[in-house]
Amino acid sequence: MDEYKGKIRLVIKTYPYKYRDFAHMAAEAALAAWEQGRFEEMHYTMLKNSPRLERASLLGYAASLDLDMKKFTAQLDRMAHSEHIERDKALAKELDLYNTPSFFINGRRLLGNVPYEYFKKVIEEELDAINK
Amino acid sequence: MIMTLSIAKFRMTCIYSVSALFLLLTVCAAASAEVKRYTVPEEGSPVIGPDKADITIIEFIDYQ
């Protein structure tokens, strides 16, 4: 997606699958990092290292990003962002989403792991429509 | 004479009807070709990238 840098605003909604052990905790970790202004770094670190997302790994990623560990650990352990995550999950259900990742590109829905070429085609169409 | 006129009238009516139907179908086809866009509330979520951009992608993600 680097080729579109500056043209894309990416909004993240958390939609952890309930039967995956670390999915909820990983979403908590992302939001805890967000609160410390380091969402982007944590987001990409977790994507790169997935599925190594158990507690010790998450703490390691947070430490490597120089986060305030006391605050981060406390938020992770008491699942401080559960309300936020539940809100996102409710929205996903409302939108009839059952797959991740799911995308809305300027409102156009792309479900599941769509081929990159298709993803790119939609982005190009949107850019063309704006530049017309 | 009268007979010929009514046949001509009937023919014209048929032509108009068929044309109207064709136009209606064309409009319907164009409307269904239009892409569907969903409105997804952002409601205070993490954002990567500039505050204003040509494209907004909302991604529902599971990190695991």
Image: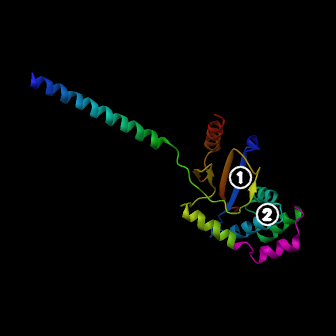
- The chain under label 1 reads A
Within 10 Å of disc 2 (Cα), the crowding (few <14, some 14-19, many 20+) is: some
Q: Is residue B31 above or below residue A72?
A: above
The number of callouts visible is 2
Marks 1 and 2 share the same chain: yes
Q: Is residue A78 above or below residue B12?
A: below
Q: Is residue B58 above or below residue A68?
A: above
Amino acid marked by disc 2? Trp
Q: Position of residue B22 (x, y in %)?
A: 34, 34
Q: Position of residue A126 (x, y in %)?
A: 63, 41
Question: Tag 1, which secondary structure?
Answer: strand
Within 10 Å of disc 1 (Cα), the crowding (few <14, some 14-19, many 20+) is: many
Residue in front for this viewpoint, A60 or B21? B21
Q: Is residue A15 left or right of residue B6?
A: right
Q: Residue at x 66, y 35 (%)?
A: A131
Q: Is residue B41 magenta?
A: no
Residue at which label 2 appears: A34
Residue at which label 1 appears: A10
Q: Residue at x 64, y 69 (%)?
A: A87
Find the magenta span and give its range. A65-82
Question: Tag 2, which secondary structure?
Answer: helix
